[in-house]
Amino acid sequence: DLDVTYMPPAVEGLTLFAAANWNTAEYDEFGNADCWYAQTKSQGCNVDLNGDGIGEAQDLSGEPLLRAPDWKANFGFDYEMSVFDDMTLRFGSNTSYSDSYSASSTNFGDAYMDSYTKTSANIGLVGPDERWQVEVIGDNLTDEFVYGGCAATSFANTVAIGTDPAFAGTGTEKGGVAGQP
């Protein structure tokens, strides 16, 4: 983890900042993780918890932790200057980057958030003695769609009551509740 803040003496009111974080987080032992919907034995839903021959769980030991990107970083600036009668103009910007990460507690392959970059900016006017403030804030100006949690679930064509366990449930050779391979 590295954090840097710098206020250049040549430009009064300017603050520059940056941070970077490197993280390699993985499950040490997680032999009873939930399976995702329709996950088959060959896809890893092969941990038989109750001895019935059907996999009820998967082993995620050594897999990446949920919402734990390898790299995160941000950088930006804040600037303020006096204007008019004892008022202050403030503006700034912040750009953040995140490496890809798993957004599913089941480590479902389609539930990975790709790496992304987001930028935000602000401009504001502060009244004398900071008694009032008007500010316009633009968040996510790069219009990035970001998610932090996903569940691989489908209720299409499923049978919730009266399903034969030989043909349904995660961890069977047929797949999930709908018997998908």
Image: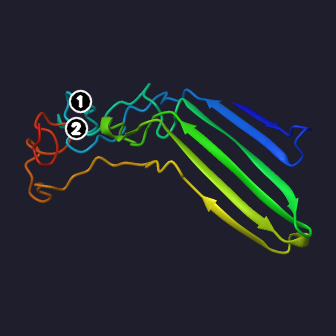
Left or right for 22, reference 176 = right
Callout 2 crowding tier (Cα within 10 Å): few <14, some 14–19, many ≥20: many
Return the residue found at the far bottom: 131
Which of the image's four quarters has the N terminus? top right
On the image, the x and y values in percent for residue 140 come to 54, 52
Q: Determine whether the residue tagged by mark 1 lies in a helix, strand or loop.
A: loop
Q: How many marks?
A: 2
Residue at x-position 56% and y-position 30%? 71
* Image disc number at residue 22: none
Q: Nearer the viewer, residue 16 or 42?
A: 16
Callout 1 crowding tier (Cα within 10 Å): few <14, some 14–19, many ≥20: some
On the image, the x and y values in percent for residue 66 come to 46, 39
Residue at x-position 87% and y-position 42%? 11
Residue at x-position 17% and y-position 44%? 176
On the image, the x and y values in percent for residue 135 come to 70, 66
Q: Quadrant of residue 17?
A: top right
Which residue carries the number 1 mark?
A: 43
Q: What type is the residue that disc 2 sits on?
A: Gln
Which residue carries the number 2 mark?
A: 39
Left or right for 19, reference 60 = right
The answer to whether the residues at label 2 and label 1 have Cβ atoms under 8 Å apart is yes
Q: What type is the residue that disc 1 sits on?
A: Gln
Left or right for 170, reference 63 = left
